[in-house]
C-alpha cells in the first residue's frame, strides 16, 4: 500500500487515519560533495567528511557524508514530502543506523512504514506511532535506517472511561 | 574518573586505552535563536523550529531546536573536545532520544561514558565501543541521550589464535 504524497500535501493525517503497514515515499534529494563538506565544516569536521584525498586513507575509502547529515536530509524529505502528519513530525527519539555511507552523487529518498499505533493512556488528545524510515539511494541500498517514535494528535479526543 | 580533554588533544586513544566507566566531558556550545532557525530552514522546516510566535501554539510552547540540530551540535562537541579516539568518531548507529527540548540561550556540553569495549572477532585491527553520551544544558538537564556504537582501531593487532 504505497502512498505517494504528490498533490496530497493539504491532507494531514491524525492518529485515527494511521494503520500498521501504511507506507509513504518521499521525493528525492541529490547529495553532492559541496553539501557533504559544508555540513561537515559546521557539525562533523573529520577528514572523511571534509576532504576527498584524506578520505581515501580512511575506513570510508573516499568522501562520505556524516551520518547526522544523512539524518538531516532524511528529516527534510519527511517534513516536505513524507509523512503528512497533523501536528508535524515530532519525535521523542528512536534507533538509528547507517548500513552504508552516503556518497557524493547519491540520490536519496525515504520509504516510511507505520509499524505500531498506540493511543496514549494518559493523554486523550494524542498517541504514539512507531515508524520505520529507510533512506535509500539510487541503487535502492539503505544508507540509513531510523525507527522513530512520533507523537501524533487525535482528530477527536478518546472517550473518557 | 572524569577526564578533561583540555590540552590533551594530541593524545589519541586506541581500543586498548579504553575501559568501562571512563568519562569524557566536552567544552560548551551556546545555542541561539538564529542557529535554531538556520538549521531548521535547511533540514527541519517546521513552525516550532522556525518561528517564535508560531512555536507558542505548538506542543513545544516556544521556539525549540530540531532534535537533529542538537545531534549535530553534540557531534561537533564530541569531535572537537570530546572523545579523543584514534581514527576519529566513527559510528555504525545507536539509540537517540530527546528528553527535553534545546532552547535559545542553552549552553550545551556532552558528558560521555564508556559502557562496553568489545574487540572484533573477525577484524584483529579494531573493536566496537558502546558510549553513553548525555548532552546537558546549563541546568544539567539532559536534552539528548545518545547511546552510540563506535568503531575504534587497536594500537596493535590482536594476536592470531
Image (tube, coloured by chain):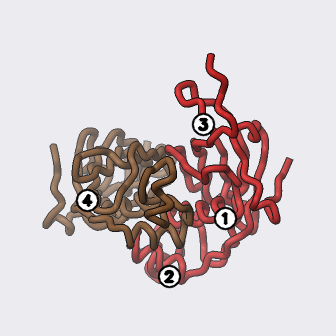
Chain colours: A red, B brown
Q: Is residue A135 above or below residue A62?
A: above
Q: Is residue B144 above or below residue A102?
A: above
Q: Residue under mark 1: which chain is it in?
A: A
Q: Secondary structure at mark 2?
A: helix
Q: Secondary structure at mark 4?
A: strand
Q: Residue under mark 4: which chain is it in?
A: B
Q: Are marks 2 and 1 in contact (CB under 8 Å)?
A: no
User: What residue is rendered at 20% in x and 69% in y?
Assistant: B10
Q: CA distance from mark 2 to mark 1?
A: 31 Å
Foreground of the two, A84 or A46:
A84
Local crowd size for mark 4, using a 10 Å CA cut-off: few (<14), some (14–19), many (≥20): some
Q: CA distance from mark 2 to mark 4?
A: 33 Å
Foreground of the two, B130 or B128:
B130
Q: Quadrant of the N terminus of chain B?
A: top left
Single out the residue that lies furthest toward the top.
A161
The residue under label 1 is A80
Q: CA distance from mark 1 to mark 3?
A: 22 Å
Q: Which mark is residue A150?
A: none
Q: CA distance from mark 1 to mark 4?
A: 30 Å
The residue under label 4 is B107
The residue under label 3 is A126
The residue under label 2 is A52
Left or right: B148 as drawn, with respect to A135: left
Q: Are marks 1 and 3 in contact (CB under 8 Å)?
A: no
Q: Residue under mark 3: which chain is it in?
A: A
Local crowd size for mark 1, using a 10 Å CA cut-off: few (<14), some (14–19), many (≥20): some
Amino acid at each position: 500500500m504505497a502512498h505517494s504524497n504528490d498533490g496530497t500535501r493539504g491532507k494531514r493525517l491524525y492518529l485515527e487515519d494511521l494503520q500498521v503497514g501504511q507506507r509513504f515515499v518521499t521525493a528525492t534529494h541529490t547529495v553532492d560533495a559541496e553539501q557533504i563538506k559544508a555540513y561537515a565544516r559546521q557539525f562533523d569536521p573529520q577528514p572523511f567528511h571534509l576532504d576527498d584525498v584524506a578520505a581515501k586513507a580512511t575506513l570510508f575509502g573516499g568522501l562520505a557524508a556524516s551520518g547526522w547529515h544523512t539524518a538531516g536530509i532524511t528529516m527534510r524529505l519527511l517534513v516536505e514530502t513524507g509523512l503528512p502528519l497533523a501536528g508535524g513530525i515530532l519525535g521523542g527519539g528512536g534507533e538509528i543506523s547507517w548500513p552504508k555511507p552516503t556518497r557524493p552523487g547519491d540520490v536519496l529518498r525515504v520509504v516510511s512504514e507505520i509499524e505500531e499505533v498506540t493511543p496514549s493512556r494518559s493523554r486523550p488528545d494524542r498517541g504514539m506511532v512507531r515508524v520505520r524510515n529507510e533512506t535509500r539511494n539510487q541503487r535502492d541500498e539503505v544508507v540509513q535506517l531510523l525507527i522513530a517514535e512520533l507523537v501524533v494528535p487525535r482528530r477527536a479526543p478518546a472517550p473518557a472511561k
